[in-house]
Amino acid sequence: MSTKHLIRTLLAAVALLAKLQEGEATGADALPVEQRTQLCAVAEEMATIAPAVATHATEILNQEAERLRTVLKLRIYIQQQTGKKAMLTTVLEQAYTGKCKTSLGTLRTEVATGAAFVDAAAYLAGRIGEALDFLADIHESGGSGAGCLSESKSAVVQGRSKINNCGKARKATTTTTTMPTTELNSEGFPKLKNAVGTTKVVHGTAFCHMLSKSTNTGINDQAVAGSPTIVDGYVKLAAGGTPFTLEDLTDLTANKKQTQAPHFTAAFNAKTAYKQAETMACDPNALTIADIKNTAEARELFWRLLHNGTGKYDDVSSAEQIKKEIEAAFRPATKFATTWLEPALKNKVAKEAVGEEGNGQIELETENDIDKLQRILNYYTGLAIKRELMATVTGTGSNPACTSEAKPSKKTPTKEDCKEHTEKDACQNAGCKFDNSKKDGEKCFADPEAKTENKEGKDGKTTSSSTCADKEQKDCKSPDCKWENNTCKDSSILLNKQFALSVVSAAFMALLF
């Protein structure tokens, strides 16, 4: 190698060394405006997670409360009714609860995952805010060029007091807030890329040794060991003279950046795990006949109550016929609200139902106290039980399976009455039994086990099975008979009735107190 070439090589090496030393001496660029803006936006969004979670949870709780109030009002009305009206209103309630299902199960999940999301988001917002505040505080005294957080290409942010957003202003959890999806989406943080912004104060002016690993920022005169980062791993410090780099956080799926950026990943995972309960259509005034027809549970209940259906319900074969019958039972549609909804939802009940004095009434339309509505329901349920027990004792009660008010009992159909029926439905409706395996004329036959309390005498008149009936007063003697209300009655029946009445009274008093 010639002397001239050797001199050139030495000069180049000296120049390179000088450049490296200059880089170490001047530190790193200040964090660009682009990164400051993007990080602040993330912190701002994270600060709105708590009120957003609270907003939706409150919405679901209000929905659940509205559902419960409506169900209680419907059931109060049902307890006040008898016969077909009570059963059809029960079917209506089933349609409502089928349309507006309870959210308590899913709300538990929402609250648990929501709390975890709030925690992760708040922690990340704090990490970002603290890092930016610290960088803002690293600036020269009496000037605006040297520092670590860029305000523009020629000036740095001079102190944390100059940062007015970045998640510092927390929204109250009572503030109605929609869940944001701009800065954190289903894949990651779309704006936190690895491209370093260009709007920044460069290292020759910034002198930001905090963002480099130069010997000037090391222990004594040694370079910093390892791979230090700030802002939870997003900003990675490089060796002296080399600009810092950024971690790409746009894709955090499958824990790709769990090691590099653990708390960004935690916030992303918490958002992914957060499950909101479904919003239901719970306005009872919006219920229609079509809703009843199209609710499978309501169709089955209609079949069981109005058809006395037992066993497994086959909706595939029965749905269309049941829909027609539901339509007929609740029509006309133009008067559905006034006939079926308003009487229950705008019901008025006695004040004594809640232990209040006075002759006025409680208007359920404006009553929102769930505990009070529950007490009213208990009151009318008790009255319904008492009414049924009294009816049983006095013999005026009706079979709960009947679809209409009580009617005079019919005599057991005879063989001749039954044989004329050839179809199963007509046969059973006549009180007969049907066996399709038998030949025509014998398929429909009288039920040998059927009995009636009254029998037909030889003269065709109905006679009582009582041994005391029709006796004169002088012949109406105990222990079998007793004269009462100008009639001779069985003593055993009277005793049974008196005993039953005492049981009813005691049971009802226990129910009330």
Image (spheres, grey):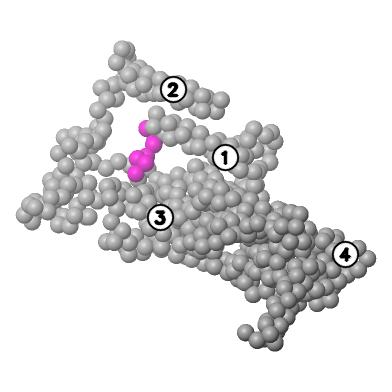
In the structure shown, which secondary structural element does the residue marked by tag 2 occupy?
A: helix
Q: Which mark is residue 374?
A: 1
Instruction: Give the residues in magenta.
Output: 395-401
Residue drawn 40% across the image and 45% down it: 405
Whether residue 88 is visible: no
Q: Is residue 425 left or right of residue 2?
A: left
Q: Residue furthest right?
A: 142
Q: Between marks 3 and 1, how big is the CA–CA gap?
A: 24 Å
Would you say the residues marked 2 and 1 are in contact, meaning their CB atoms lie under 8 Å apart?
no
- Give, as a three-letter code, the residue at label 3: Ala
Q: Residues within 10 Å of mark 1 (few under 14, many from 20)?
A: some
Q: Is 351 drawn above or below residue 276 in the view shown? A: above
Q: Which residue is mark 3?
A: 298
Amino acid type indicated by mark 4: Glu
User: Does the CB distance between marks 3 and 4 fall below 8 Å?
Assistant: no
Q: Which mark is residue 503?
A: 2
- Separation of marks 3 and 4 at Cα, in angstroms: 76 Å
Q: Quadrant of residue 487?
A: top left
Q: Which residue is mark 4?
A: 140
Q: CA distance from mark 3 to mark 2?
A: 36 Å
Q: With respect to residue 511, does 450 lie above or below?
A: below
Q: Could you say which quadrant of the image residue 424 lies in? A: bottom left
Q: Secondary structure at mark 3?
A: helix
